[in-house]
């Protein structure tokens, strides 16, 4: 939980609820083995864990993006027109708006490409979390695959690895 914003309160509350419920079940069953407690992990991943992991990719990116590049890119884009398109409920843009955005963002195409690659990796990580193991026996292989994706996240973003 972030003490300055309160961010993470919902996740922490659900995690605590799920942990308590699974602990009660395990004690009631007379089986407090990792296997019997594993349901806690899958509930967290099914509810919010994978989504949070996918969002964390953008936190990683934010530590590596040059603020001047980001501000320059934002200033170069036709912000009002993009906002109007989104306000109308559409993420599609007219051909003219696409051309204008491409021309004005010319010096920032590498940054845009980096954002796109990062988004693709976030999607890949979400897919990985969708296949979260249903038992501890499969965890080592799953973790290895997840770590390989995260290695590519750090390589693509240029951020320093957190772990």
Image: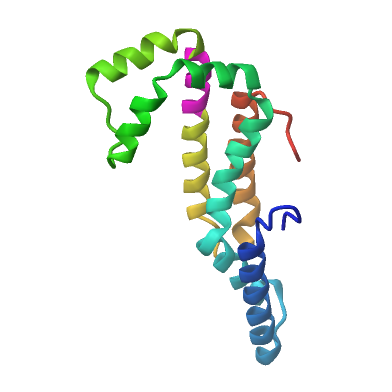
Q: How many marks?
A: 0
Q: Position of residue 49 (x, y in %)?
A: 58, 57
- In this picture the colour scheme is rainbow
Q: Is residue 115 magenta?
A: yes
Q: Where is residue 93 in the image (x, y as percent from the top left)?
A: 27, 27
Q: What secondary structure characterizes most of the magenta part?
A: helix
Residue range of the region highlighted in magenta in the rendering: 109-117
Q: Can residue 77 be seen in this view?
A: yes
Left-right relation of 101 to 11: left
Residue located farthest toward the front when viewing the structure as drawn? 80
Kindly identify the residue that appears in the image at 54 percent across and 57 percent down: 132
Nearer to me, 29 or 63 = 63
Nearer to me, 133 or 82 = 82
Kindly identify the residue that appears in the image at 67 percent across and 65 percent down: 12
- In the displayed structure, 17 sits above or below 89; it is below
Q: Is residue 151 visible?
A: no
| The C terminus sits in image quarter | top right
Q: Where is residue 65 in the image (x, y as percent from the top left)?
A: 63, 24
Q: Where is residue 122 in the image (x, y as percent from the top left)?
A: 51, 39
Kindly indicate the quadrant of the structure image that contains residue 94. Answer: top left
| The N terminus sits in image quarter | bottom right
- In the displayed structure, 40 sits above or below 69; it is below
Kindly identify the residue that appears in the image at 23 percent across and 19 percent down: 95
Nearer to me, 154 or 14 = 14
């Amino acid at each position: 939980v972030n003490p300055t914003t309160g961010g993470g309160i919902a996740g922490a509350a659900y995690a605590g609820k799920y942990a308590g419920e699974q602990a009660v079940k395990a004690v009631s069953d007379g089986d407090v083995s990792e296997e019997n407690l594993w349901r806690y992990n899958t509930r967290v991943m099914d509810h919010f864990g994978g989504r949070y992991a996918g969002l964390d990719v953008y936190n990683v990116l934010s530590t590596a993006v040059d603020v001047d590049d980001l501000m320059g890119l934002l200033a170069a884009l036709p912000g009002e027109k993009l906002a109007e398109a989104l306000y109308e409920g559409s993420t599609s843009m007219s051909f003219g708006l696409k051309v204008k955005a491409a021309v004005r963002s010319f010096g920032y195409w590498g940054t845009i490409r980096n954002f796109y690659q990062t988004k693709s990796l976030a999607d890949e990580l979400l897919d990985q979390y969708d296949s979260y193991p249903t038992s501890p026996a499969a965890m080592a292989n799953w973790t290895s695959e997840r770590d390989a994706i995260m290695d590519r996240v750090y390589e693509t973003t240029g951020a320093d690895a957190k772990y």
